[in-house]
Every structure is written in C-alpha cells, then in structure tokens.
Amino acid sequence: MIATWSVSASADPILIDRVARDLMRVKPEVTLGDFMACDKFDRMDRIGDITVRTLIICGEHDRMTPKKYSEYLHEKIKDSELTIIPEAGHGVMLERPREFNRVLEKFVGSL
C-alpha cells in the first residue's frame, strides 16, 4: 500500500514494484518509527522563521503529503519558489526525474 501511495496512479507498474521491493527491505518497526516521527513532527508555527531562499517541489498527485501542504509552505516562507510537477506523486524525483532535475538545477543556478 505504501508503494502505491508513494507514486501517482499513472506511474509505471515497474516503478511501483521497485518501490515496493525497496520498502520490503526495511524492517517494519523502522517504517513504523518513520511514520510516527513524521506524524509527531510539527513546526507549523515556525515556518515563517525560515529566511533563506527555499525551493518546494511537489508532485501534483502526492497522496502522502498532499500539495496543499506545499502550497501552505510557499505561502508562509517569504522567499520560496513552488513547483508542482504534473502526473507525479510523492516519489516525484523517481517518477519525473528529468522535470525534477530541471527545476532543481534552475533553482541552484539562480543562487
């Protein structure tokens, strides 16, 4: 289920299988710990304290961290840039590596 939710519905089944195999190599208690840490981590009240240029990249169909959270970060971080990559999920860098790298390279080049 995590592998399926980590990519968009249009993702190549080979990619989904690869993600699932990679996830199966991780002990269940480690995965649970990761999800619990993510669930408990909350710095929403401090987002406005970020003062460096920030790039936010999100997959249009991210079900693990929906794009509304990326939009929120962009709204609260003064010097941020938001790119939502179409037809990608949470694993945007795996699903759309060319687009992801193009956005990242452009941002780094502008620093």
Image (spheres, helix red, strand yellow):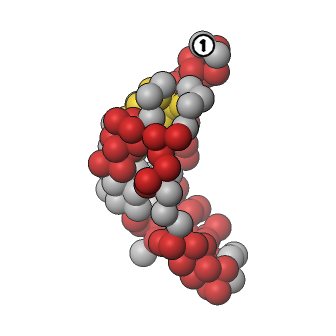
**Relative image position of residue 81 (x, y in whole percent):** 45, 27
Residue 50, position in %: x, y? 55, 38
Look at the numbered disc 1 and give the secondary structure of its residue.
Answer: loop
| Horizontal side, residue 49 vs residue 27: left or right | left
Instruction: Choose top left, top right, bottom left or bottom right for residue 13.
Output: bottom left
User: Which quadrant holds the C terminus?
Assistant: top right
In this view, the residue farthest toward the top is: 110
Instruction: Check disc 1 and give the amino acid type.
Output: Ser
Residue 100 seen in the figure: no
Residue 40 visible at all: yes
Query: Which residue sits at x=34%, y=54%?
Result: 66
Q: Which of 30 and 88 lies nearest the eye of the viewer? A: 30
Q: Position of residue 56 (x, y in %)?
A: 48, 36
Q: Quadrant of residue 21?
A: bottom right
Quarter that holds the N terminus? bottom left
**Residue annotated with mark 1:** 110
Q: Is the residue marked by circle 1 packed among few (<14), some (14-19), or many (20+) residues within 10 Å? A: few
Front residue (pair 45, 2): 45
Above or below, 61 relative to 23: above
Q: Position of residue 90 (x, y in %)?
A: 45, 53
The residue at the point 47 percent across, 45 percent down is 47
Q: Is residue 28 above or below residue 105?
A: below
Relative horizontal placement of residue 51, taking residue 89 as reference (left or right): right
Q: Residue at x 48, y 72 (%)?
A: 39
